[in-house]
Amino acid sequence: MELNAVRNSYARWAPIYDQTFGRLTNAGRRRSVAYINQYTGTVLEVGVGTGLSLPHYKPDLAVTGIDFSEEMLDKARDKVRLRKLDHVTELRQMDARTLDFPDDHFDTVTAMHVLSVVPEPERVMSEIARVCKPGGQVVIANHFARERGFLAILERLTAPLENVLGWHSDFAIERVLQDPRLSVDLNRPHPPFGMMTFLVLRKA
């Protein structure tokens, strides 16, 4: 994904995201947050978008959200204000390729339905690994390309439209597994209909 395409896509989707793709991925988003809620400490949500996940975090977590799109963040800030989500400590506009946080800063870093829409996902994963504390976890929910079957064919056919669709349909899981600091703890299908993948990575 090119940066301008990402910016334009986010601006286009922001007014209707909650009612469209957000609704489709809501069950998976809740499951991801339910997993994170088993733990304590600080959480960074990379690509917080319109803040759909924010009401579901337990109140004793300290949640920071970042997103590239100010249009999306405006929606998230409205949710935080209207629902009095005091566990959300900060929402900031930021490029996930250059996170403005210290090394080893967060107990949990999560990226839900964002890695296949950002430029240079390998660089994003490197930053995620950097800001995650040693022994901390990285929680990912994302669509990854299938190797066979009808959907695999469809993913390859729509791949050239990534800048129009706003996401990379044939995104390979290997692109988020390359950082040597992170190892796979959990890999399982995720809603809707098992189309997504739920990954938990652990920082050594």
Image (cartoon, grey):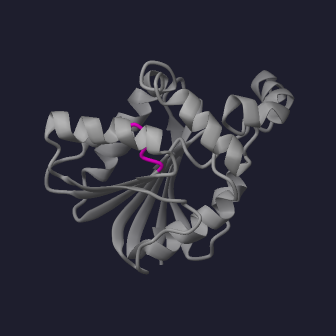
Residue 21: x percent and y percent? 51, 25
Residue 58 higher or lower than 192, as above or below: below
Residue range highlighted in magenta = 47-51
Residue plotted at (50% across, 76% down): 130
Q: Nearer the viewer, residue 64 or 13?
A: 13
Tell whether 39 sits left or right of 131.
Answer: left
Q: Position of residue 168 (x, y in %)?
A: 72, 39
Residue drawn at x 52%, y 43% is 188
Q: Is residue 160 left or right of residue 191?
A: right
Q: In the picture, residue 136 is in which quadrant?
A: bottom left
Residue sitting at x 23%, y 65%: 41
Kindly identify the residue that appears in the image at 36 percent across and 63 percent down.
Answer: 108
The answer to whether residue 51 of the structure is visible from this angle is no
Determine which quarter of the picture holds residue 123. bottom right
In x, y percent, where is residue 173? Answer: 68, 51
Can see residue 85?
A: yes
Horizontal placement of 107 versus 194: left or right? Answer: left
Nearest to the observer: residue 46 or residue 38: 46
- Residue 203 in picture, x, y percent from top left: 47, 73
Quadrant assignment, res 18:
top left
Image height check: is 80 above or below 104? above
Q: Nearer the viewer, residue 84 or 114?
A: 84
195 magenta-colored: no
Main SS of the magenta segment? Answer: loop
| Image label count | 0
